[in-house]
Amino acid sequence: MNRFARVVAFLWLLFMFGLMLSSALQKSPTMDEDNHLVRGLAFVRTGDSRLSLYHPPLVNSLAALPVALNPAVQIPVESDAWRRADWETMSNLVVLTRGAAADAMINISRIPIMLLALALGALIFRWARELAGPGAALLSLTLYAFDPNILANARLNTTDLGVTAFVFLAGYGVWRWQARPAGLQSSLLTGFLIGLALGSKYLALIFVLFFGLLMLVKRDIRPGTWKRAVRTVGWLTLMAGVSILTLWAIYGFGWDVPWPGSTARWPLGLYLRGAVDAGGRAGLGQASFLLGESSKGAWYYFPVALLVKTPIPTLLLLLAAVLITIRERSFQREDLLLFPCLGYLLALMVTSFNLGYRHMLPMLPFLFVYAGKTATLLLTGPSIRRIALAFMPIWLIAASLAVWPHYLAYFNEAAGGPGNGYKILVDSSIDWGQDLLGLKRYLEREGIDRVKLSYFGPDRPGYLGVDVELLPGIPPESDLWYDLRFDPQDPPPGVYAISVTNLQELFFVEKRVYPWFRAREPDAVIGYSIHVYRVGDREH
């Protein structure tokens, strides 16, 4: 069974890479991929982390490595944008001004993220096998390798898959540290892995907090064991020191001001300033769309997103795993898989920073390993139960293949599928600008030489190769939202291409610009994220 499981695992990872790569090559650069690339490229080339305020540099730097090998791609350190640490202008100068070549740069930068995703899959297989055997390992890997949300984000140059991988790696290190007597080597290694997680994205701080709480609680810190408690605190202190040193090394041992207006420079000053900034933005909230309405965030946003975008087979297997845990009272053996995920989800729910399902990705590998335990039911119990359980991974694989290559737009069958998703969630949960290339191909195929465009993504309308009339789109402060060039109740004839995030007017509670279009079925849908309407005299 072990050899069979390893062979299938290798095939699954190979197939996963094929799905990621073939999908990525059909998609345009998404929102912020250019920003992530220029941040990483700037740090790799100069060692200066000034553009890395909003994200630590680890994942961005890994993604930028293959692009950095091209000497033609330069960082204009003499520009005013560099002096001001203006990463948006820098991304335009370094990436987007290259026109169609920008697609090639970003596609190349996606490869390291895909390789990181494969390494994560191998680690999921290993942890699940150590916990519950080869059958569980194979089931856990199947849930991961064919999950549309994983496939969607694992082939993009963003930090979401990166933080998912490094947080899970840190969790595995914590689990091994708990499972055997603490020592110097294990404490140093676990501290190093936690430092990598912290260097991947600020969201990792939440997981690290819960890892720390579990390590404190589970090391027999009880009355009468004070010597063991002192040793445990000592090992944890060493671990924390190694984590901080690793994080500082990721920043190139730089000294930066920890808050605006300060003149004193601290080690990890930029990380501290970025973490405070991220916490402030999470507290203030940002416009989000859920179930037809826009707001500054809702506490139930992420639970709803979890239910509508997680594949139904995965949800059913998780439910079965919970029932097994209750029956066997095995929560204490599985707390590292569940407790940090529950705490992380609760932390997301109390913020107003509802930016999409992707923020729940760090939970998924832990849940896949947890669900893998249901593989034991294949060998026991009534045949109807075994048949039903065996059908779950088949269902998942079929659903994953059916939505290819439009993984970002995946919604499960209970939510009405990807065609209905824009009515529930928008932004990075379905529409991140990934289908501009698909729109270009559609216009060429249909012989359309003029389009009225409302695009949610990196702003390159000239990329389409046709005459473009811009409609209200992003950025949200654009005057076009307030100075309408057409009657929203009676739009003039023409071909309209509207990203669904703009169609739902994400940034506005009062939706007054696109009601005419929302009330009609589109004439074409590009990758589930851009609706095309042909408005003619017959409409008036």
Image: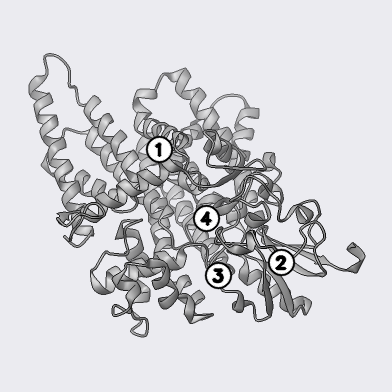
Tell me where residue 373 appears, x and y as whole percent: 46, 33
As drawn, the label of residue 459 is 3
Q: Residue at x 16, y 60 (%)?
A: 253
* Secondary structure type for disc 1: loop
Horizontal side of 201 relative to 184 (left or right) equals: right
Q: Residue furthest left?
A: 227
Q: Is residue 298 above or below residue 356?
A: above
Residue 168 in view of the camera:
no
Lower position in the chain sequence, tag 4 or tag 3: 4
* Secondary structure type for disc 2: loop
As drawn, the label of residue 133 is 1
Q: Nearer the viewer, residue 235 or 516?
A: 516
Q: Between marks 4 and 3, how big is the CA–CA gap?
A: 25 Å
Quadrant of the rendered image containing residue 115: bottom left
Tell me where residue 169 appears, x and y as whole percent: 32, 47
Tell me where residue 471 appears, x and y as whole percent: 67, 66
Q: Amino acid at mark 1?
A: Gly
Foreground disc of the pair 4, 3:
3
As drawn, the label of residue 151 is 4
Q: Residue at x 58, y 55 (%)?
A: 408
Q: Between marks 2 and 4, how big is the CA–CA gap?
A: 39 Å
Q: Is residue 312 above or below residue 385?
A: below
Q: Residues within 10 Å of mark 2 (few under 14, many from 20)?
A: few
Quadrant of the rendered image containing residue 236: top left
Q: Are marks 1 and 4 in contact (CB under 8 Å)?
A: no
Q: Amino acid at mark 2?
A: Arg
Q: Amino acid at mark 3?
A: Asp
Residue 225 in view of the camera:
yes
